[in-house]
Image (cartoon, rainbow, N blue to C red):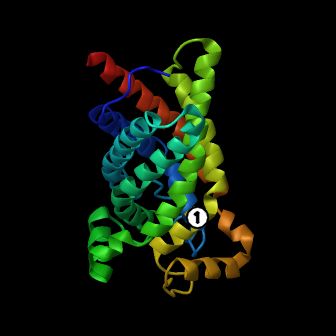
Amino acid sequence: MSEKDPSFRVALVAGGCAGTSVDVALFPIDTLKTRMQSPQGFYKAGGFKGVYNGMFAAAAGSAPGAALFFSTYETVKANLLSRFDEKYHTACYMASSSCGEVAACWIRVPTENVKQKMQAGMYPSTRIAIKGIFEQRGYRGFYVGYFACVLREIPFSFIQFPVYETLKKRWSEWQGRDVTPIQSALCGSIGGGFSAATTTPFDVVKTRLMLGRDREGTQYNGMLNAIFRIYAEGGVKKFFTGIVPRTVWIGLGGCVFFGSYESVKELLLDMM
């Protein structure tokens, strides 16, 4: 691992570049996942048509969301690692990533609400989606599913980032030098894919809350209500709807995300 610690500004820029790279490159897979999880079913939600619906909303939120995550993550991580012994470093990675996710969700959730409603065919454009959400529920409408999103992201990060950081450290020790951006990308892909599969149930609940209504048109009344109704539709199996595209999307996304992040971070640190 590099001896140079990224500053707040470096993490901000590198994280923004990484987030945009992933969301644009792999957006169609995310759309297919959302449509599989939609209560109206895959084909009624759009099937394979218009897989780029909502990409503008995703792209608009990806850079600031990822930038806020990484700047928070790197700042908290550096603070914790300097205070605790190495045997506690895994817990430090977990705490740092959790802080990053809570911060990033303030940006991520509003854009997710717009994006997923467009992916499911509920609105034809970003402008109309924003207007429709605001007219229905005001500003609060953009934060529907916030707690479900946080509950998805924290266990995701609990798994992903310790795996990512540990793999990087062990690989670096094994080869006797810092890992390359490509090696970091592979570590991120392994951590991301495994984390994505295990946290799919949280993602299904979050998607249903953001889409708002079940196939009968009845609105979900909070997270617990959504959980019970999803279970009633098909038992435990229903909570793993979309696990394959989600795992592929985030596995590949982890490769692109962490590869981009480490590449931009190294470039910026070398320029300083």
Quadrant where the C terminus sits is top left
Residue at disc 1, secondary structure: helix
Q: Name which residue type carries label 1.
A: Phe
**Toward which corner of the image does residue 268 lie, by quadrant?**
top left
149 to 265, vertically: above or below = below
Q: Residue at x 26, y 65 (%)?
A: 127
Image position, residue 114 (x, y; %): 37, 65
Residue position marked by numbered label 1 in the rendering: 202
Which residue is the extreme one toward the top? 176
Q: Nearer the viewer, residue 132 or 67?
A: 67
Q: Nearer the viewer, residue 68 or 240?
A: 68
Q: Is residue 207 in view from this perspective?
A: yes
Q: Is residue 45 in view from this perspective?
A: no
Q: Residues within 10 Å of mark 1 (few under 14, many from 20)?
A: many
117 to 244, vertically: above or below = below
Image position, residue 245 (x, y; %): 61, 52
Q: Residue at x 57, y 75 (%)?
A: 40
82 to 244, vertically: above or below = above
Q: Nearer the viewer, residue 244 or 176?
A: 176
Does 264 sit left or right of 192 as displayed?
left
Q: Nearer the viewer, residue 219 or 13?
A: 13
Q: Residue at x 44, y 64 (%)?
A: 116
